[in-house]
Each structure stands twice: as structure tokens, then as C-alpha cells.
Image: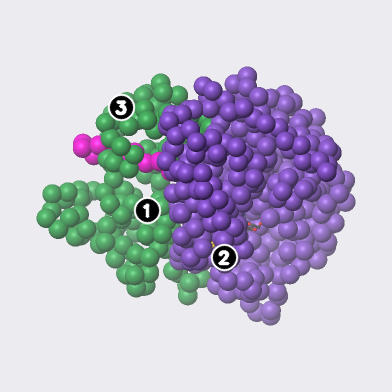
Chain colours: A purple, B green
Amino acid sequence: MGRKLLLEHINTPGIQGLEGYRANGGYRSVEKALRTMSPEAVLEEVKKSGLRGRGGAGFPTGMKWSFLAKPEGVPRYLVVNADESEPGTFKDRYLMERIPHMLVEGMITSSFALGANTSYIYIRGEYFYVARILERALAEARAAGWLGKNILGTGYDLEIYVHVGAGAYICGEETALLESLEGKRGNPRIKPPFPAVKGLWQRPTVVNNVETICAVVPIINDGGEEYAKIGIGKSTGTKLISASGHINKPGVYEIELGVPVEEFINSDEYCGGVSGGRPLKACIPGGSSVPVLPVELIYRTAKFETRLMTYESLSDGGFQTGSMLGSGGFYVFNDSACMVRATWNHSRFYHHESCGQCSPCREGTGWMEKVLYRLEHGLARMDDIDLLWDIQRRIEGNTICPFGDAASWPVAAAIRHFRDEFEYHATHPTKVKDPKHFEKEPFPRVERSYAG
Amino acid sequence: MKKPDHGHPHGDNIVPFTFSEAALAECREVMTHYPAEFSKSALIPILHIAQTDNDGWLSVPAMNAVAELLGIQYIEVYEVATFYSMFHLQPVGKHVLQVCFTAPCMLRGADDVIAHIEKRLGIKEGQTTPDGVFTLQAVQCLGSCGTAPMLQCGAKYHEHLTIEKVDELIDKLRAEPKRSNFTDR
Ligand SMILES: Cc1cc2nc3c(=O)[nH]c(=O)nc-3n(C[C@H](O)[C@H](O)[C@H](O)COP(=O)(O)O)c2cc1C
Ligand code: SF4
Ligand code: FES
């Protein structure tokens, strides 16, 4: 059994309320930080922990915090990114719904370290009922003196507000999120300036994912060094993985970074094996924006090393033979799945969610969706595959925000690893008219060897 | 609550709108969350309140009332209302069934759920039943992929769907006189 830092008490009765949360050691990090530590000392612990952003990019949190500008007399902000819209990702909702005070606690301790007196939770609009749960937790915390003026008599003031969005994946990108929080369309900003210098209302701002801020709680309670003992290399601590797709036990799992992927998929402690009594075909380990891995690259890397659930191991081999840990949105395909259909589905998502500011992204995502629609429905020609490759290549790297890359990578990886399935679609138009074509007659998967 | 005049020759977009007392109080409370000089930040939360107050959709008069409340230009409201997928700019049914059809849900049968609802209600995705009770929408990932297939109706998530569960839900909602809103408590 791996250690549980975030989910240890997730099923404890009453943990949703302040009383139950306190009874299980809640708010200790606030007492410790505000009473016995300086903001700099809190930052130092976070640095020592090696914690990396859990929102997808994996940027070291301590370093991000140390970039925060501190001009005299200008308010600074902590904004928690609870937009969680990356397909395959549902861990933040689980935390906020089941143990809302953990986020509140993490925010108080983190805001103290950053010198923020106002802090916002930007939550996606579809999670309205979760926003209500958070509001209730905040009201409880306020009534008990954990929020407001002069917290614990230390002279530190903090208010936290919940801000609901209204349905736009792009608002998860931190500068789009800030635009949206300012009451505008979610158009990502051109960087620099970075939010650490000019963020919310042009004031210094740190944006962090829900899980990142929750992880600050055990880091302050037990010390950064203790946290850094878990994991491997630069992948320290525990990570929540949202597991879904063709597995026996979908759900949110907390892993110690470093668990082998094979164990994660097959062990009863986690996914419980591939569902439907069918063989594994592919896996997307970090949300829809990361490259898909074909079966031969899931348990082992191209170098024939065991593939581990860490930032480094999952990206081993770069985009040729690797992927990314991303947000931990882990979904699995068995051999009834059609990779062309899945890719079409992804491209439809990116077309729908593009903010429309950059032409390569706005036009390219729509074009990819159309070509993939043709391929999936048996209306395409062989050279459409090359056309698709060409379009994705021209989006990547040519846009204001990383959304353009996120839209291209899944298409590139699908063609790279499953070109034979794309060709089958071009050459068997009648067969693929049935949306369940591979359910009845699985496509023979040729395992390729990437060594050497 | 007023009814939109579906039969009006100029469409529904000229039916006047004023905030109810309760909604207005809620808007005023939300505005205290932001520094006074940046009260425009309250726009999206207030549009949600206005949408609920206007039978589940944002008409032009409703958006104009929001602009006047916040002291901003009408266009600033329109450009936001048109950007976000949760804002309906046309009248919708009393219960909007939003079925997730993104990849992880597709792997677990979302397409079958949509096809079943289409057949059961006699409408296509994106349409509203003639009696104005149901609208069916296919939407992108709702952060519930581990409990797929799923749909959202108002503030509620309905998870681990089966055809039987969908049928039960439709029967239950048909008998439910109150509109399902995102802002429901
Ligand atoms: C298109 C796009 C969508 C994103 N969506 C999310 C999201 O839903 N939640 C999140 O925490 N980060 C998301 N991010 C990453 C954020 O921009 C940002 O890096 C993150 O919130 C920083 O927090 P962290 O350092 O704690 O991970 C997204 C990034 C991009 C480019
Ligand atoms: S890459 Fe796409 S989502 Fe990002 S700013 Fe450009 S158009 Fe918008
Ligand atoms: S894919 Fe349907 S909820 Fe995520």
C-alpha cells in the first residue's frame, strides 16, 4: 500500500465538515505556519519538497512562488485553478467535493507564504454544486476564525472567494483564467509579462492547481524533506491519478510517484485490469492533450526499461516513443476501441474549445476535425492521412498559448503509432461505416519494436 | 415568473426583463467579492443568476439589464455571453440534458445514451421537445469520466448511466414542475 497524503481521510465519516476535518488533524498546517514560521520559511519548505505543479505542466511550485513580484503597496493574489476540464481528469472535483477543507487549509497556508490577503478559487461552471460545497466550507472556516481579520491573533488577514466560470476549457490556461476572472472572454494573454508580475487586474498573482495547493498541507505538517523522500528523482511525493476508460475499477487513486504503469493498470489496488476481458491496446496517461501510447510502449519504454508513473519515465523517448504525466488523466483503450474514432473525438473537442485568437489554432483544429470525420466515416482518401499530418505540424508552436500544441500532439501521436488503422479506414469505407467496427472484429495490432 | 412569448413576431428577444428581488440581492452579494473598481469581474457569476431568472436562457433584454447593473457597455456582456458554452442564447427546455460525449465517456457508451435519448424523446441532439420540457445537448468532458457514461441536468450530475437509469430520469423529470438550473442549491 502506498502512502496516502491527500486521500488518507477521504472516506472518514464527517470529513466534509469543519468539525470532522479538525478531528482528523485539519488546519494544523495553518497553526504551524502562522504561529511558528515566517512566509519565507513556508516557501523554503515547499522548495525542499520538490513539489511540481499538478495542473499539467509540472513546473516546480517553490520556484513559481519565488518569482512573485512584491512591489510596495500593491496587493498580490493567489488564484486556485479549479477549472479542471482536461478530458480524462476528475481528481480536483473529487478533492473539493469530498474534503473541501483541505483546499481551504492549503490556501490559507499558501496565501500566508505569498503575502496575499485575498484569494480566489476559479471553478468551472459545470461544478456549480461543488462551488456550493466550497462556499459552505469557507463559511464554516470564517465562523471559526480561520479566515477574516487577524487569523489566530497573528495579525494576518485573508478572504477567500469562489468564482464560477461558465464552460470553456481554455479558461484552465492560467492567463485565460485571469481574463475570465476579470469578466472577459477567456482569451489567453501574450506572455511575458507573466502572472507573477502582472496577473489578476495587472497585479502580481500566483495561479496553482487545486491538488498542488492541497499538497502544501502535508508538506508544512511533516516538512518538505519528508515529502521529498516519497517518489523518484525529480518526481517527488504523491500524485492523484484519474483513471477511466476500459478498466475494471475507474476512479481517483493516490499513488506514490514511481509505481510501475503495469502495476497501476493491473493491480487490484488501482485500476484492477483491462475491462471487457479484452487485451490492452493503448493508453493516454496524462489527459487528452498528451500523446497516446500503443500497447508495446505502455509497460516498457523503447529502451526496454520498466515504465514508471513519474514525470521523467512517462516522457522517456520524447514524443517519438513517450508521452507525459500531464494532469494524471489516465485512460485506457482495449482492442474494441478505434483509434481513428478516438482521435476524431479529441479533435472535435479541441475545435469546440479553441478560443479563436490565433488562426493556426482556430482554423487548423476545425480542419483536422473535418478530415478526421471523413476518415472515421469512410469518406476519406489515403492522402488525407498526410494532409492531417501536415495540418497538425503547422499548428504546433505557432500559437499564443500551448492549446495549439495540445490539439496537435494527440493527432501526431495517433498517426505515428496507429497509421495502419488510419490506412484501414481509408481502404475499407464500408466496414468503418459501422461505428462499432472494431468491437466485432478487432483490428489486428502489429506490435512494433522501437529498440535501437 | 414571466413566460417568454414564443409566439411573438419579433422573436423572444424583445420580452422585457427585470431582475427579481432575490436575484438582485444575490448579484449585489457577488459584487462584494471584487474590488469596487473591478466590479466587472462579477459578470460571469451574474450572468448565471440572470439566466436562471430568465427561464434558463439569456435574452438580449436580460443581458442589457446585466450591463446596466454593472455599469458596463452592452457589447461587453454580449461578447462574454457568446463565448461560454453554459449560456443559452435561445430559449431551452425546462430540463436540459447535457450528455458528455468526449473520449473517456465514449469508451463507456456515451453514444448509445445519446441515441437512446434521441429515440425516446423524438428529437435530435441540440433540439427541444415541442412541449418545451426537454432539450438534449451533447457536451464536452464534465470531469466525471470515472463514472461514465454520465449527463448533467441543472446542477445535478447523473452518473454510471444505463438505459434503464436514463428512462427513470426522464420519467422523473417529466413530472417535475420546477426548472432545472445550474444555480440550483
Ligand atoms: C489549454 C490549457 C488548459 C489547462 N487547463 C488546466 C486546468 O483545467 N487545471 C489546471 O490546474 N491547470 C490547467 N492548465 C495549466 C495552467 O495553465 C497552469 O499551468 C496551472 O494551473 C498552474 O498550476 P500548477 O503549477 O499548480 O500546476 C491548462 C493549460 C492549458 C494550456
Ligand atoms: S492557441 Fe488556440 S486557444 Fe490558445 S490563444 Fe491561440 S486560438 Fe486561443
Ligand atoms: S469524458 Fe465524459 S466526463 Fe470526462
Mark 3 touching mark 1, by CB under 8 A?
A: no
Question: SS for tag 1?
Answer: loop
Q: Is mark 2 within 8 Å of ligand 2?
A: yes
Q: Residue at the location (41% across, 47% down)?
A: B183
Q: Position of residue A422 (x, y in %)?
A: 55, 40
The residues bearing labels 3 and 1 have C-alpha atoms spaced at a distance of 26 Å
User: Which sits in the foreground, A283 or A243?
Assistant: A283
Q: Residue at the location (36% across, 24% down)?
A: B167
User: Which sits in the foreground, A12 or A295?
Assistant: A295
Q: Is mark 3 within 8 Å of ligand 3?
A: no
B130 drawn magenta: yes
Query: Mark 1 = which residue?
Result: B87
Return the chain for callout 1: B
Q: Is residue A236 left or right of residue B103?
A: right
Answer above or below: position of A272 versus B138. above
Point out which mark residue A399 bears. 2
Point out which mark residue B120 bears. 3
Mark 1 touching mark 2, by CB under 8 A?
A: no
Give neighbour class at mark 2: few <14, some 14-19, many 20+ (Cα, 10 Å): some
Numbered disc in front, either 3 or 2 = 2
> What amino acid does circle 3 point to?
Arg
